[in-house]
Amino acid sequence: MSVEAKPTGPKQMNLAPAPDPRGNPAYPEPVLGNPVSTLMESGVGNCFPGLEFDVRQLDVRFFPGLVFEFLGVTPAGPDGTQGARLVYSDPAGDPIIADHFTADGPQWITDLKKQFAGPEGSALGDGTWYLHFVEQDGKRIMMYDYALYQNAAGLTPYEGETVWWIIRLIEPDKPLTIALTQRAADGSPSGVPVVLTGRRRQFLNDEGMIDPVYHPGELTSSMCSPWTHDFRDCACHYWASNHPDVVLGEVDDPQQQLDNRTDENDAAQAVTFIDWMRRRHEPLKDVSAQTTLPKARPDRYDPYEINLHWQQLDFVLQGQEAEATPPVPQMLKLIKYETLEKMVADLSEKLAGMELTLAMEYLYAYFSLREPDEVTAEEETKWPGLREDLHAARQLILSVALSEMTHLRWVNQTLWLIHKAYPRLGPYKPCLTAAKTISEPDPATPDIEKTRDRRLCRATQVVLQGFVDVERPDGPLDTEYVNLVGLLRESKEPFPEGLYQLAVRIDSDGMQHYQKFRDVMRFLAPYAEQEALYLRPIKEGNATSPEVKPALDQIRTALDGLAEAYAIEAELGDMPKANAKIKEARDAMHRLNDIALGLARKNIGVPFFAVFE
């Protein structure tokens, strides 16, 4: 089985028009695909490079228009085929070259395009070619080991791993010359080399996305096999992004089970984490996962078993095992904004402010929770899971608050790109004012949107339920971004590159926020009758108080820094200068965190919204 087929992600469904039972025109059928957390920038490979994909596969396309393979990565002796072999020349399939227009692109691409169209490019279509040398800044490195001269007529090529290391040292944004040659049977160069000049490929574009030249599965095509041994023997620390450690059993809805509590056993099963690698037979099927690896190993499939029973490892959707694809909730019909002006007004006057308001509400709830080290020995004895539950709840709420700040940046980025593309909209202005009201569904009439005033409240079960309702899929906030996605996907307007991806990311994150707040409610539910176990009795501080004023000053500093950074990036595109301002904002937020924690220990809450009054 290939790496892409590992049975730990959701099964894919075809995206095709389907009749709407409500009588609306055909609408896209929703897809149960991989969540945002499986994107490469979210993976464990950021900490352990090479575990998410084979980094050598990036360099097979290090030179635009050419595709190489590295032979002899594990030294097997000189046989004339080591080094970097040209798999094929494909300038027409490389966006750098194919999408280039002479009038508006770099000169080096124009020159390289001519080289591929001339005798040099034609020669590469016949025979087998190898990388002969690379040259940059006047330094030429030949791809041969001169210490291993076989005879006066022959040279021994470097192994593929050595050639790859040399290629890794090539700098981007500098002229680069490479030569390719054919070889004699002993590996020594023969014939006339083909020389090309260009630049090293940059693997990420300006939006931080992988260059589209890489085909699906290409970056993982050379990874280890069989994957089942990796899943059996690699600890969760190395497979955290796609190897579940513990999971919930298959029940209809864990939260609904808890709410109804019609069957105590089912309710317990809904929140009992079980070992995903366990042997699938009684009584191990639904027994709580062991707390240490030595305890868990005896009840897990051994290496021989995992090769026989890998198909018994269930798919995992949102942390829950599923033997088959569950029914998909009906997706809301995409309702596009009527005009570009209406979309811009909605983003700037409503959505940006709502993201900031929610971030501040979540931060206040975060600071209202006790810190784990405040739990006394007596409380720990009576409530043995309290410390861990506090730690988990605080971490989840803080992660959602930070995500909302990321959304605030993305909404602003969407706005400045649109303003730049359409001058008729006027100049872009940073949107960093908290909204006074929040849209949320009415439980009694779900189809009717209502609004509430912004508020700062402690993280009680009622308040957390309000957060769940705000982030609920198909709720007012989610629907706003569905409309944005619909416009960017279906409009014939030539929107700037990357806007659609930004909208999808924001829309996708909403589901994670919803699930995280449900998890927080579940963690803290056992203490709901004794809120003092997990909640501080904080109250909003006086904005003019000498104790509170430093916190508000840091909020203003952070917002001012972000406003300057966004304006610089939008108007000048000066990233170093913009990043310096963003760093100032981050430093202010770190200072705010320290001040707010100190105030919370005195039961004083930061009146976040005072900076806008």
Image (cartoon, rainbow, N blue to C red):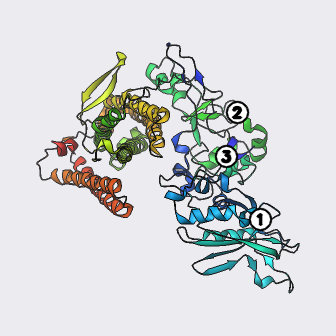
- In the image, residue 203 sits, relative to residue 344, either above or below, namely below
- In the image, residue 242 sits, relative to residue 58, either above or below, namely above
- SS class of the residue under badge 2? loop
The answer, for residue 369, to whether it is visible in the render is no
- SS class of the residue under badge 3? helix
List the residue tagged with mark 2.
280
State the image coordinates of residue 239 (x, y, percent, origin top left): 61, 49
The amino acid sitting under disc 2 is Arg
Q: Earlier in the sequence, mark 1 or mark 3?
A: 1
Report if the CB atoms under discs 2 and 1 are less than 8 Å apart: no
Q: Is residue 508 left or right of residue 465?
A: right
Quarter occupied by the N terminus: top right
Residue at 22% over, 49% down:
599
Report if the CB atoms under discs 1 and 3 are less than 8 Å apart: no
The amino acid sitting under disc 1 is Ala
Find the distance from the CA under tag 1 to the CA under tag 3: 58 Å
Comparing 262 with 54, the one in front is: 54
State the image coordinates of residue 68 (x, y, percent, origin top left): 72, 61
The answer, for residue 199, to whether it is visible in the render is yes
The amino acid sitting under disc 3 is Arg
Which class describes the residues within 10 Å of circle 3: few (<14), some (14-19), or many (20+)? some
Extreme-right residue of the structure: 185
- SS class of the residue under badge 1? helix
Q: Which mark is residue 297?
A: 3
Q: Which mark is residue 123?
A: 1
State the image coordinates of residue 405 (x, y, percent, origin top left): 35, 46
Question: Comparing marks 2 and 1, which lies closer to the viewer?
Answer: 1
